[in-house]
Amino acid sequence: MSIRAVVWDVDDTLFDYTSADREGMHAHLLAEGLMAGYGSVEEALARWREITDLQWARFAAGEVDFVTQRRDRTRVFLDRDLTDTEADDWFDRYLAHYEAAWALFPDVLPVLDALAASHRHAVLSNSSLTVQDRKLRVLGVHDRFEAILCAAELGVSKPEAGAFLAACEALGLPPHQVAYVGDHPEIDGRGAADAGLLSVWIDRDGARATAGLPAGPRRIASLSELPALLGVDTRFGAPSTFR
């Protein structure tokens, strides 16, 4: 049976999170006079991401609320005993630099346009609705999706099948009529395939060796390949080349 809907990951699939994260942190560290404490922006960013992952895990487990995890990320990163107001102010300044670097990948709008008439669209992210709803609005694509689901509100996250099945339920479609597009071969790729969706892994840089890749997901290098994979009659992009 044909694919009737596409569910999308957000970060590093639609939104160039990696570039925005690096550029935003670099600009923020310079503005705050903190670059001297690190050998490179990559070193600072690696520490920020490690702290973010740990604090987000606490939030996902229900140990702290969303605002508290942000404040704690700031306190741990700076190694300072900040008041709530001080932590909020620092994070808001960081957020301004980060948001200034937000951008969609160049292949996103063309593929959404190409599939607009043939497929329904939704989002499934391991983030929170607070974050992703605003992000999609700022990027100008919020209205492209009829449902936006996030792990923090669902109570289940990728690669668990329940997350993917919740997206299918929101669309009122069985898994075999839904495609999922994401950038992580295991969390997105294998997770969607195991849940019974058509799994599409977007691997833009092709940095991963072919050996050891998960079975199940279709691997593409550009979203321009997606219409052909879904059987859409369009001149958009090149024919799909699976690796």
Image: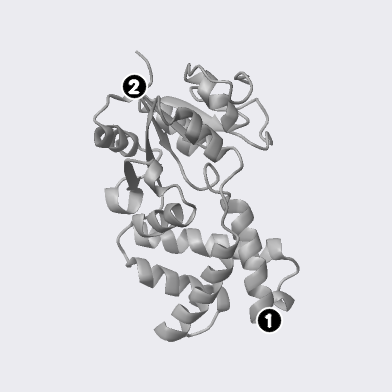
Is residue 28 rendered to the left or right of residue 182? right
Position of the C terminus, as image quadrant, is top right
- Snapshot quadrant of residue 194: top left
Q: Amino acid at mark 2?
A: Gln
Residue 153 shown left or right of residue 134 in the figure: left
Q: Residue at 54% of width from left, 76% of height from top?
A: 93
SS of the residue at dot 2?
Answer: helix
Looking at the rendered structure, the kind of residue marked 1 is Gly
- Residue 59 seen from this side: yes
The quadrant the N terminus occupies is top left
Cα separation, mark 2 vs mark 1, equals 52 Å
Q: Which mark, residue 33?
A: 1
The residue at which mark 2 appears reads as 177
| SS type, badge 1 | loop
Q: Which comes before the other along the chain, label 2 or label 1?
A: 1
Q: Which mark is residue 195?
A: none
Residue 80, position as x, y percentages in the image: 53, 83
Q: How is the image coloured?
A: one colour
Place of residue 147 in the rendered image (x, y in percent of width and height, measured from the top left): 31, 42
| Residue lying furthest top | 1
Mark 2 crowd level (few <14, some 14–19, many ≥20, 10 Å Cα)? some
Residue at figure coordinates x 51%, y 48% from the top left: 11
The residue closer to the viewer here, 17 or 50, is: 17
Q: Nearer the viewer, mark 2 or mark 1?
A: 2
